[in-house]
Image (cartoon, grey):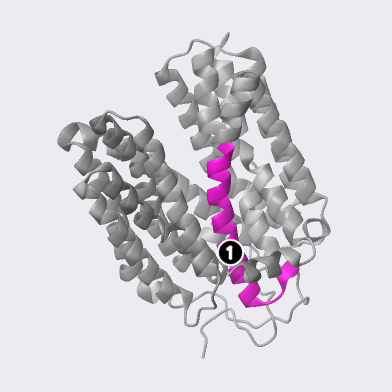
């Protein structure tokens, strides 16, 4: 298992690109908790903190696909680095000015969200030119999904450490400065500087003109909804038990399950169409969420949370392959950015729905939202099976003939159906 990932990391530029992307995404991964801690330290209410975090999330949802399209049109360095700098300036403005002017505070957070650089989609656009073979690229997708789990675990811990050592304002400044350095590391690398998207057909819908991509986005909205609802349901479960630490155990178990699932998934080669494999993984994901509605004792619930997390990273990694197969030529970064946006909007919807579910029916109902989200995600994939079975591209490309993920695979591999 480890040998496969080491093989990826030993490839020239691979470790630098993965590390730089993760560091560059720290501001995005830690923004909600950093905003809440800063707002509370400045005397603001939880309502204000939530509203600011929501504005940041909405800004990110709007900005990611727009910036992703800009990357496809103009290249990575001309978009990623200025965007990272603007996003950092927005957060710095919030940290330095505070809440003397609420419109300014909202504007600063909105700027930080909209300008968040699409480093996640950019990295996936670079993997084929760095790794070459399709099998290695697919393994890199799994490693990418696992690395995200690590970032979303370590990032909040880093924020709380900076807050304890200095202040919430300092945490905002330091995290965003680190993020700019991460983006700088990526865009100065040779693969990022030389990457060019394939020629694209001019169309105002961009990546969204692909029916297969739309089907995938519809499914992953509900996957995001399931995951978002669990964050609220976990808090409700901990309150029921009268132990705040229980929430941490549940989230840690969920993350550990995802780490294990992603590592195992990426350690082997898979045959057959990824669309069919994704349906199986999402079915198992939904099946893992459903037992959470039983809300048993803490030990059993922690185990169930770990099991529920096992298929999340494999589902995300497999979705990357499906995006690659269905994104219209020349829209790859935008397509991956739409996946990020849709997943994030779904997670926000999940948190919004799970709260009233707790009020209406208790903790079990809030976990039922997660189960329903998983089932809905599967139903979308089943209902759109014919669309997903027909990737928009099926040409074979020789490695190095085009520095673009839409076709850069090893000779002998195809981007469409396998014989």
Magenta segment boundaries in residue numbering = 128-155
Q: Residue at x 26, y 50 (%)?
A: 292
| Res 372 seen here | no
Q: In front: 94, or 68?
A: 94
Residue that carries the numbered disc 1 in the rendered image: 141
**In the figure, is residue 139 to the left or right of 244?**
right
Q: For numbered disc 1, what is the local secondary structure?
A: helix
Q: In front: 266, or 206?
A: 266
Q: Residue at x 78, y 47 (%)?
A: 185
Is residue 61 depicted above or below 215 in this figure? above
Quadrant containing the N terminus is bottom right
Q: Residue furthest bottom?
A: 419
Q: In front: 3, or 196?
A: 3
Is residue 53 depicted above or below 96 in this figure? below
Image location (x, y in percent) of residue 12:
80, 65
Is residue 151 part of the magenta span, yes or no? yes
Image location (x, y in percent) of residue 342:
46, 50
- Label 1 CA crowd tier, 10 Å (few <14, some 14–19, many 20+): many
Q: Residue at x 32, y 70 (%)?
A: 382
């Amino acid at each position: 298992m480890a040998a496969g990932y080491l093989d990826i990391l030993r490839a020239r530029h691979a470790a630098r690109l993965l590390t730089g992307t993760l560091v560059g995404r720290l501001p995005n991964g830690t923004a909600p908790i950093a905003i809440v801690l800063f707002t509370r330290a400045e005397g603001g209410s939880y309502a204000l903190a939530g509203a600011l975090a929501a504005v940041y999330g909405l800004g990110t949802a709007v900005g990611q696909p727009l910036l992703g399209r800009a990357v496809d049109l103009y290249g990575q360095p001309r978009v990623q680095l200025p965007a990272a700098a603007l996003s950092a300036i927005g957060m710095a403005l919030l940290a330095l000015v505070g809440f003397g002017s609420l419109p300014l505070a909202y504007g600063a957070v909105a700027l930080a969200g909209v300008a968040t650089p699409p480093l996640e989609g950019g990295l996936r656009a670079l993997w084929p030119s760095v790794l070459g073979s399709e099998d290695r690229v697919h393994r890199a997708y799994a490693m990418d999904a696992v690395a995200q789990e690590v970032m979303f675990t370590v990032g909040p811990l880093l924020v709380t450490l900076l807050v304890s050592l200095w202040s919430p304002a300092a945490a905002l400044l330091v995290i965003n400065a680190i993020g700019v350095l991460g983006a700088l590391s990526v865009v100065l690398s040779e693969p990022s500087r030389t990457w060019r998207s394939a020629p694209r057909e001019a169309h105002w819908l961009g990546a969204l003109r692909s029916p297969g991509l739309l089907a995938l986005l519809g499914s992953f909205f509900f996957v995001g909804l399931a995951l978002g609802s669990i964050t609220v349901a976990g808090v409700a479960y901990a309150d029921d038990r009268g132990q705040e630490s229980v929430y941490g155990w549940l989230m840690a178990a969920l993350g550990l399950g995802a780490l294990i699932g992603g590592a195992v998934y990426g350690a082997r080669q898979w045959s057959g169409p990824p669309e069919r494999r994704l349906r199986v993984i999402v079915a198992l994901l939904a099946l893992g969420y459903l037992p959470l509605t039983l809300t048993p004792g803490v030990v059993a619930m922690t185990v169930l949370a770990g099991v529920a997390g096992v298929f999340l990273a494999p589902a995300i990694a497999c979705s990357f392959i499906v995006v690659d197969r269905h994104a219209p030529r020349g829209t790859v970064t935008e397509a991956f950015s739409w996946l990020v946006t849709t997943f994030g909007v779904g997670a926000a919807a999940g948190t919004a729905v799970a709260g009233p579910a707790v009020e209406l029916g208790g903790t079990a109902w809030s976990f039922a939202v997660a189960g329903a989200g998983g089932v809905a995600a599967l139903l979308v994939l089943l209902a759109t099976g014919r669309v997903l079975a027909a990737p928009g591209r099926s040409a074979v490309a020789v490695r190095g003939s085009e520095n673009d993920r839409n076709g850069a695979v090893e000779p002998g591999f195809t981007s469409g159906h396998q014989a």
